Amino acid sequence: MKHFVVQRENQIVQQRDIDLVFGPLEANEEILVIDHDDLATMAVEAGLFPSKGQSRRNGLAGPAPHGLHQIGTKKRRFWVWNPVAGDEKVILNPSFDRTLGWFK
C-alpha cells in the first residue's frame, strides 16, 4: 500500500511528523513525499485506475482534501496526508473516501 504526503515549496514536512502521522509501517507499505496534490495521479500511482482520465471520470479529480484521508476501493486503497489546504475545489466521490471506516 502506498501513502502520499503532499509537500509544498513553502511548507516542508519533517520526517518526524510523517512518522507521527503514519506510525510504524508494515513491509508492504511505502511513503511517497510528492510536490503535487492531484488525486488522479495518486490513484494511478497507487494502482486504483490504469489512467488519470479514468480516475477523473470515476470522481477523483482536483487536489487532495486537507488532512488525512484513506481513499480507494474495497480492494485497493491509499492514504494521503495534505497538511496545507489548497485554493482549488476538491472533487472526491464520497464512495472513494474510506476514512470514516478506519476511525470508527
Image (spheres, rainbow, N blue to C red):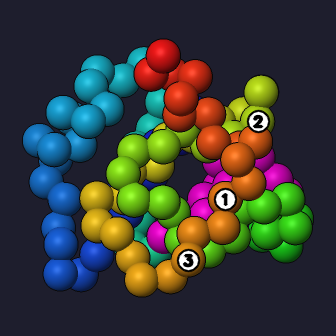
Does 16 sit left or right of 57 as displayed?
Answer: left
Label 3 crowd (10 A; few <14 / some 14-19 / many >=20)? few
**Amino acid type of the residue tagged 2 in the rendering:** Thr
Dot in front, 2 or 3: 3
Residue at 53% over, 34% down = 99
Work out whether 25 lies above or below 42. above
**Amino acid type of the residue tagged 1 in the rendering:** Leu
SS state under label 3 = loop
**Residue at mark 1:** 92
SS state under label 2 = loop
**Residue at mark 3:** 89
Cα distance between the residues tagged 1 and 2: 13 Å
Cα distance between the residues tagged 2 and 3: 22 Å
Q: Position of residue 34 (x, y in %)?
A: 41, 65
Q: Position of residue 15 (x, y in %)?
A: 16, 47
Q: Are marks 1 and 3 in contact (CB under 8 Å)?
A: no
- The boundaries of the magenta stretch are 37-50
Residue at 29% over, 21% down = 24
Residue at 78% over, 61% down = 59
SS state under label 1 = strand
The residue lying toward the viewer, choosing from 41 and 95, is 95
**Residue at mark 2:** 73
**Amino acid type of the residue tagged 3 in the rendering:** Lys
Cα distance between the residues tagged 1 and 3: 10 Å
Q: Are marks 1 and 2 in contact (CB under 8 Å)?
A: no
Label 2 crowd (10 A; few <14 / some 14-19 / many >=20)? few
